[in-house]
Image (tube, grey):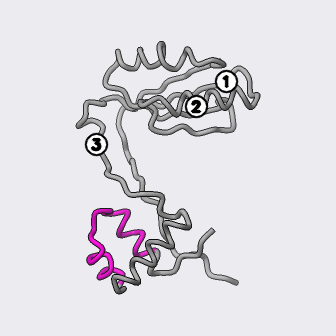
């Protein structure tokens, strides 16, 4: 784990708010020279703190009106069965996120679809046929209360 100082945290906050800020503006906000800023960014990128830069796209503006969470249980948990499931899910464009869980279900998928028919096709024609599938439970999102991608960047706890 990399140690972040106050400048790193300020820089990351600014990028999380608007990754399109120019380097000149970023340098001004964190009170660094252009060279100092580039060194900081490169260090954060090389350490894996900054994995990339992306646009936040409104799914509904593109016609994906339904957000769903799909819980999945596999029949078997042998490494080859798990690897097969993960490869299949990674190739499904409707799946935005896939999380391996503890508890009753093995995986939680965050899925977007255009409408009920698209959801039906996704469940019956894409997900269900995946070899090793056991249980599928789908929940439809009625409204999004919070959908944030920004990681909180609070001060580290004081050493005692």
Report the residue at 32% width, 21% height from top: 115
Spot occupied by residue 45 in the image (x, y as percentages of width and height): 49, 66
Q: Which label was assigned to residue 87?
A: 2
Using the image, determine if residue 131 lies above or below residue 85: above
Spot occupied by residue 6 in the image (x, y as percentages of width and height): 47, 81
Magenta stretch holds residue 155:
no
Using the image, determine if residue 116 lies above or below residue 19: above
What is the crowding at mark 3: few (fewer than 14 residues within 10 Å), some, or many (at least 20)? few
What is the crowding at mark 1: few (fewer than 14 residues within 10 Å), some, or many (at least 20)? some
Distance between mark 3 and mark 2 Cα atoms: 26 Å
Q: Quadrant of residue 93?
A: top left
Q: Secondary structure at mark 2?
A: helix
Distance between mark 3 and mark 1 Cα atoms: 32 Å
Distance between mark 2 and mark 1 Cα atoms: 14 Å
Spot occupied by residue 88 in the image (x, y as percentages of width and height): 55, 27
Q: Which residue is mark 3?
A: 58
Magenta stretch holds residue 28:
yes
Report the side of 133 relative to 148 (left or right).
Answer: right
Look at the numbered discs 3 and 2 and tell me whether their residues touch, using CB distance below 8 Å.
Answer: no
Q: Secondary structure at mark 3?
A: loop
Q: Quadrant of residue 2?
A: bottom right
Q: Say which label, 2 or 1, has the lower sequence index.
A: 1
What is the crowding at mark 2: few (fewer than 14 residues within 10 Å), some, or many (at least 20)? few
Q: Which residues are magenta?
A: 9-30
Report the side of 24 relative to 6 (left or right).
Answer: left
Front label number (2 vs 1): 2
Q: Which residue is mark 1?
A: 74
Q: Secondary structure at mark 1?
A: strand
Report the side of 42 relative to 33 (left or right).
Answer: right
């Amino acid at each position: 784990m990399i140690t972040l100082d106050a400048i790193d945290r300020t820089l990351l906050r600014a990028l999380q708010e608007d990754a399109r800020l120019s380097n000149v503006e970023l340098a001004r906000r964190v009170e660094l020279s252009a060279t100092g800023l580039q060194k900081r960014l490169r260090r954060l990128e090389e350490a894996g703190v900054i994995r990339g830069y992306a646009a936040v796209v409104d799914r509904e503006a593109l016609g994906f009106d339904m957000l769903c969470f799909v819980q999945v249980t596999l029949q078997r948990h042998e490494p080859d069965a798990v690897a097969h499931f993960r490869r299949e899910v990674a190739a499904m464009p409707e799946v935005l996120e896939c999380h391996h869980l503890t508890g009753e279900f093995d995986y939680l998928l965050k899925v977007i679809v255009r409408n009920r028919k698209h959801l039906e096709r996704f469940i019956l024609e894409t997900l269900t046929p995946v070899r090793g599938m056991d249980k599928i439970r789908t929940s439809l999102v009625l409204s999004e209360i919070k959908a944030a991608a920004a990681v909180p960047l609070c001060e580290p706890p004081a050493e005692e």
